[in-house]
C-alpha cells in the first residue's frame, strides 16, 4: 500500500499520536500463504520468522525487499475479496436467528 498523509499527527511518544487520517492506495490485494514467507527470519525479533511478527514490527531493509519480491512475484488465485460474500451471508443468517428467537 502507498500511504499519503493529508492531516493528523503521527509522531512517536504521544498518547494521541494516531489522531487524524491518512489515505491508502492499495497496490496488491492477494493471498500469499505463510509458507512462502516463513523462511525469512528477523534478527531484530529473536530470529523468528517474519510470519510471527506483530503489527508495527520493524523489518530491516534487506528482509523487506525479500518480502516485496515474493509478494510481487507470487501467482495468487484468491484474495480477501473472495470472502466478502461468505461473511455477508453469515451475517444475514445470524441476524435472522436473532429475529426468530425474539419473536
Image: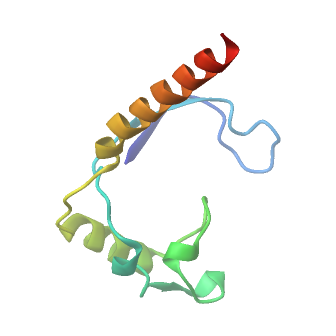
Left or right? Give the position of 102 relative to 13.
Answer: left
Residue 14, picture quadrant = top right
Query: x%, y% of residue 35?
Result: 38, 80
* The C terminus, quarter of image: top right
How is the protein colored in the picture?
rainbow
Query: x%, y% of residue 17?
Result: 72, 39
Up-down: is 15 above or below 38?
above
Up-down: is 10 above or below 47?
above
Q: Nearer the viewer, residue 101 or 61?
A: 101
Residue 58, picture quadrant = bottom right
x 63%, y 82%: residue: 44
x 62%, y 21%: residue: 98
x 43%, y 37%: residue: 87
Query: x%, y% of residue 29?
Result: 30, 49
| Residue 6 appears in the picture as rendered | no
Up-down: is 93 above or below 75?
above
x 80%, y 50%: residue: 13
| Residue 64 appears in the picture as rendered | yes
Q: Nearer the viewer, residue 31 or 6?
A: 31
Left or right? Give the position of 7 relative to 19.
Answer: left
Left or right? Give the position of 80 relative to 4.
Answer: left
Image label count? 0
Amino acid at each position: 500500500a502507498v500511504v499519503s498523509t493529508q492531516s493528523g499527527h503521527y509522531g512517536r511518544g504521544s498518547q494521541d499520536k494516531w489522531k487524524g487520517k491518512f489515505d491508502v492506495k492499495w497496490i496488491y490485494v492477494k493471498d500469499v500463504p505463510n509458507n512462502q514467507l516463513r523462511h525469512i527470519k528477523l534478527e531484530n525479533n529473536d530470529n523468528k520468522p517474519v510470519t510471527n511478527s506483530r503489527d508495527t514490527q520493524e523489518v530491516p531493509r534487506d528482509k523487506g525487499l525479500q518480502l516485496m519480491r515474493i509478494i510481487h512475484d507470487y501467482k495468487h488465485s484468491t484474495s480477501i475479496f473472495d470472502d466478502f460474500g461468505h461473511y455477508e451471508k453469515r451475517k444475514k443468517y445470524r441476524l435472522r436467528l436473532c429475529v426468530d428467537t425474539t419473536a
